[in-house]
Amino acid sequence: MTNLVTDIEETVAASPEATAIGFQGQEFTYEEFWAQTGQFAQALADAGVEPGDRVGIYLPNLPQYVVAFHGILRAGGIVVPMNPQYKSREIEHLLGDSGAVAVVALADLVPQVQEIQDDTDVHTVVSVGGAADGATEYDEFLADDMLETVDREDDDVACQPYTSGTTGTPKGVLLTHRNLSFEARASPKIHDGIHADDKTLGVLPLFHIYGMTVTMLATLYEGGSFWPMPEWDAGEALDLIESEELTIVHGVPAMFNDMVNHPDADDYDLASVRFANAGGSSLPMEVMRQFEATFEPELFEGYGLTETAPVTHANRPDDRRPGSIGKPLPGVEAKVVDHDFEEVDPVPEGPVDDETELDDVVGEIVISGPNVMKQYYNRPEANEEAFSYDDDGKRWFHTEDLGYYDEDGFFFIVDREKHMIVTGGYNVYPREVEELLFEHPDVADAAVVGVPDERRGETVTAFVVRDAGADVTEEEIQDYCLNNLAEYKHPREVHFVDELPRTTTGKVQKFELEDFEDVTEE
């Protein structure tokens, strides 16, 4: 294999007039899509972007995102996806750490880039959706000529998304052409593949590995059509699925919960959907049951991580166990190990009942396979912690997720080892929010935890000790966080307390805060 985008050339040659992208009443053929990726790649080269250079994409789900992603790869570059909800303080690390030399941004987001551009290597900014000072408008940026696809090796890095570790500091994940190509081919096989007449809902954010690989890449590499949505709205999603007769729907559990609870849910006909899948966080059994009762298509659950590109496990239409994350994909190996890296024995059949002593069956889930990342970018200590090798020299990635498996090969997640909060499918690392709270002049102490929430999975909740004499309010704390962090990270609840529960060594006892009714509030 060379550059993974060469796979699309085969589809273009075979079906040039087939729809590659559908968006707000317009359809773009594979021939049109492929031509524009070539023009974008040539424009990058003309701007001085060389093979191996990194280019940031700071956009919501738009056709231009799809073109830019493939154009960067076609030019031999490395994609650095960035959440369009991020503010300048959040993208500064991503651009600075990656060394990105160019950014494709929504026109309204260009000022966020300019605010920190002098502290990065970014020399080219492209604006989408309008003109912006200091940026070249997308249509003007496109070159007249098309660049031929630059050869890349299987082990060359194609994409560098960012995730956070236990410290909350974002780490660049080096995903290779082989990683992404494997996932784009393997993940659709759990539901009989993607066919030329399939239409995939593209509402999962494309900066997120789930949306990027399982919806966009898998659909285009198999010759289906991709229908992006810039933002989530349950009614608009249901309208789109019904009107365009979409056949494949991926989402996080909160999205399916919103569909079920839409006031007109019973009026929608989703008979066109032949596969629906939830990922990003644990799927509540009740949401699964209600979705199937309301809309009829079965709702499946899978599992994966950014570091595994992402899917490692999935339930299949002919091999499903509710409550489980399913079985490993073909070609991917998984096992459950204890602290000594010894394999834990399976249970006869899961899920286990309340009488089972979880400590006897639970361990950490580790993964090996062609989907596992190359490494973290410039993080030797993190890489050392992330991987272990068995006696045969096989490399295993530590997921830091606790679980067990049964004799039929189904895996079950029990808990996370760390304090990461998963809200609406997004990962929120408490320390990042806590660091910001500590910068507030009226905050003396703070801690952030996740509190169970039926819709989001967890709600970001802050416990704040006011500075002496301060009278800062809950609304002021929330506004402060909203002005400096992505919307989904801000605390939806703020509780003021006299002091935080701490151990004798000064560590906050977060388990006490999670049961916050027992905390003495002012």
Image: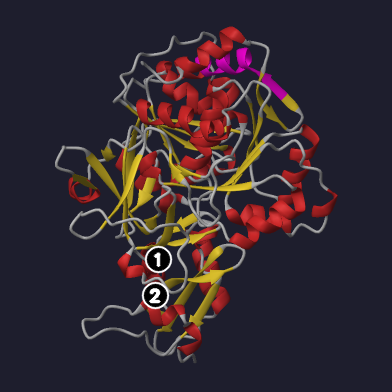
Disc 2 is placed on an element classified as strand
Segment colored magenta: 27-39
Furthest-left residue in this view: 391
Query: Residue at 44% across / 9% down in the picture?
Result: 148
Count the marks: how many? 2
- Judge whether 18 appears above or below 312 on screen: above
Magenta span: chief secondary structure: helix
- The correct choice, above or below, for 218 with respect to 106 in the image is above
Amino acid type of the residue tagged 1 in the rendering: Pro
Q: Which residue is mark 2?
A: 447
* Quadrant housing the N terminus: top left
Residue 97 left/right relative to 316: left
Q: Quadrant of residue 506?
A: bottom left
Vertical comparison of 419 with 192: above or below: below
Residue carrying label 1:
430
| Residue at the image position 42 percent from the left and 21 percent from the top | 4
Q: Is residue 283 magenta?
A: no
Callouts 2 and 1 close, C-beta under 8 Å: yes
**Residue 284 screen position, x and y as percent:** 58, 61
Which of these two is toward me, 217 or 191? 191
- How crowded pointer 2 is (Cα within 10 Å; few <14, some 14-19, many 20+) is rated as many
Depth check: give the residue in front, 345 or 215. Answer: 345
Distance from the alpha carbon under mark 2 to that under mark 1: 8 Å
Q: How is the image coloured?
A: secondary structure
435 relative position to 222: left or right: left
